[in-house]
Amino acid sequence: MSIHIRPAQAQDAALILRFIKELAVYERAGDQVAATEAGIVASLFGADSPARALICEVDGEPAGYAVYFFSYSTWQAKKGLYLEDLYISPRQRGGGAGKLMLRRLAQLAVEQGCGRFEWSVLDWNQPAIDFYLSIGAKPQAEWVRYRMDGAALSDFAAG
């Protein structure tokens, strides 16, 4: 088995959207995807894009993707790498592609002088949790993540 990881390009937008939809279905949120190919091109590959993406290929076939961006830690006075999405198609899981994707992201974090490499996982996704623990990642249980979106975001912004 040959696993190749490469930077995503604008022409990968349809593939990335397909993987986003597959991930959303897996995460029980398939009806929440609002992304479009045009939106992906603009948001991932535009001149001012804050995010980047990788494509994983197994034996020359697309097998998954990762989307990440750089964050910042005031305590460390360093940037960090935040993994927004990591997805490997079900038929390719268990062959090492996910681990290699995470290793490539860790390498990027080290190359960029990041003090942290972070991501979130749904609390019911035990296979992912077990995998992350197996590679040395530790949960940050003392932090609770908050989100504001949709009407709550608009209403709060409006005052």
Image (cartoon, helix red, strand yellow):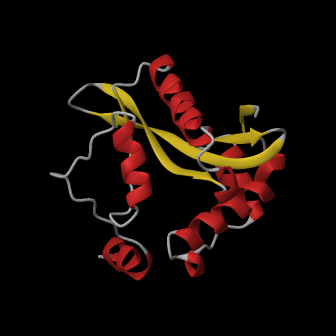
At x 15% / y 51%, what residue is drawn? 142
Q: Nearer the viewer, residue 24 or 154?
A: 24
- Left or right of 79: which side holds 9? right
How many marks the image carries: the answer is: 0
**Quarter of image, res 147:** bottom left
At x 76% / y 40%, what residue is drawn? 58
Q: Nearer the viewer, residue 150 or 10?
A: 10
Location of the C terminus (image quadrant): bottom left
**Quarter of image, res 55:** top right
Residue 34 against residue 121 in the figure, above or below: below
At x 48% / y 21%, what residue is drawn? 112
Residue 14 against residue 54 in the figure, above or below: below
- Left or right of 80: which side holds 101? right
At x 34% / y 42%, what residue is drawn? 133
- Left or right of 70: which side holds 139? left
Q: Position of residue 144 (x, y in %)?
A: 21, 59
Q: Position of residue 146 (x, y in %)?
A: 28, 64
Residue 33 against residue 101 in the figure, above or below: below
Q: Position of residue 99 (x, y in %)?
A: 53, 36
Location of the N terminus (image quadrant): top right
Looking at the image, the residue that sits furthest to the left is: 142
Residue 133 against residue 6 in the figure, above or below: below
Q: Position of residue 20 (x, y in %)?
A: 64, 62
